[in-house]
Amino acid sequence: ANATSLATIATYTATKDENIMVGAYAGFPQNYTGIRSFGIYKGGTPIAMDKGPASEGEGSHQSSVFANIHLNAGESVNIAAQQNSGTSLSVTFVINSTRRFTFK
């Protein structure tokens, strides 16, 4: 993610009305400045968010988010990361999974 913008990492668009479970995990490299955020968004609105200060000490800032979401056909879910350290930082790793299931 660059110095201030929200970077979309993954997008899923429903082809039919459905309920989905989304889980994602990310790590930002060590940097002592700013805030890190990582979340799941539906139509630009945060559904699940992890937000906190930059890591102090060794290691990366790690985030995870999970949500059960109902989507109508054509609606999308995005997994996105943001940081505001004042310099570009990459997301060092992201594991995301979307498992579709139906309630009856």
Image: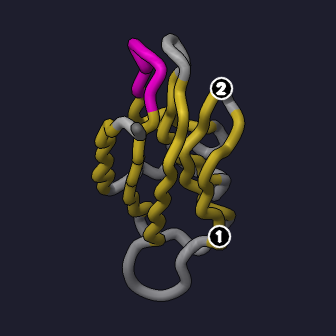
* Display coloring: secondary structure
Give the quarter of the figure containing the C terminus.
Answer: top left
10 Å crowding of disc 2: few (<14), some (14-19), many (20+)? few
Residue furthest bottom as drawn:
57
| SS at badge 1 | strand
The residue at 59%/63% (across/down) is 50
Relative to 67, say whether 6 is above or below. above
Disc number lying in front (2 or 1): 2
How far apart are the alpha carbons under marks 2 and 1? Answer: 23 Å
Q: Secondary structure at mark 2?
A: loop
27 sits to left or right of 55: left
The x and y percentages for residue 35 are 67, 63
Q: At label 1, which amino acid type do we have?
A: Gly
54 inside magenta stretch: no
Query: Which one is in front, 73 or 54?
Result: 73
In the image, residue 15 lies in the stretch drawn in magenta:
yes
Callout 2–callout 1 Cβ contact below 8 Å: no
Q: Nearer the viewer, residue 89 or 71?
A: 71
> What amino acid type is highlighted by mark number 2?
Gly
Q: Which residue is mark 2?
A: 43
Q: How busy is the neighbourhood of tag 1: few (under 14 within 10 Å), some, or many (20 plus)?
A: some
Residues rendered magenta in the picture: 12-18
Q: In the picture shown, does residue 62 fall above or below 18?
A: below
Quadrant of residue 103 in the image?
top left
State the residue at coordinates (55%, 53%).
38
Name which of mark 2 and mark 1 comes first in the sequence: 2
Question: Which residue is denoted by mark 1 in the rendering?
Answer: 52
Q: Which mark is residue 66?
A: none
